[in-house]
Image (cartoon, grey):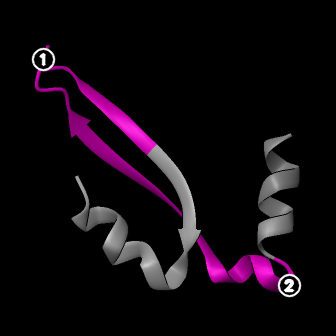
Amino acid sequence: MAKKVVATLKTGKGKDFTRVIKMVKSPKTGAYTFREQIVNSEHVADFFKTK
């Protein structure tokens, strides 16, 4: 299934999007979690600026 998603993102309008992963530390437990999202290529910097 992952191959199909990657293949569709590389064609047509899919080139305008980027998959970003951000590591976030939990203030309660101190453990790290990963936030993963597909965003427009123009908004990648905004994704990493938000907490």
Q: Which numbered disc, 2 or 1, marks the residue closer to the eye?
A: 1
Q: Which residues are magenta?
A: 11-35
Q: Is residue 51 left or right of residue 33?
A: left
The residue labelled by disc 1 is 28
Q: Kindly identify the residue that appears in the image at 86 percent across and 84 percent down.
A: 12
Q: Is residue 6 left or right of residue 28?
A: right
On the image, the x and y values in percent for residue 11 come to: 85, 79
Viewport quadrant of the N terminus: top right
Mark 2, residues whose alpha carbon is within 10 Å: few (<14), some, or many (≥20)? few
Q: Which mark is residue 12?
A: 2
Please name the amino acid that badge 1 sits on: Lys
Rendered position, 46 above or below 24: below
Q: Residue 17: say if magenta.
A: yes
On the image, the x and y values in percent for residue 28 come to: 12, 17
**Mark toward the start of the polypeptide (2 vs 1):** 2
Rendered position, 48 above or below 10: above
Q: Kindly identify the residue that appears in the image at 37 percent across and 36 percent down.
A: 34
Please name the amino acid that badge 2 sits on: Gly
Q: Residue 26: say if magenta.
A: yes
Q: Kindly identify the residue that appears in the image at 18 percent across and 26 percent down.
A: 26
Rendered position, 12 above or below 7: below
Q: How far apart in space, not on screen, are marks 2 and 1 (Cα)?
A: 42 Å
In terms of image quadrants, where is residue 44? bottom left
On the image, the x and y values in percent for residue 7 come to: 85, 63
Q: Which mark is residue 19?
A: none
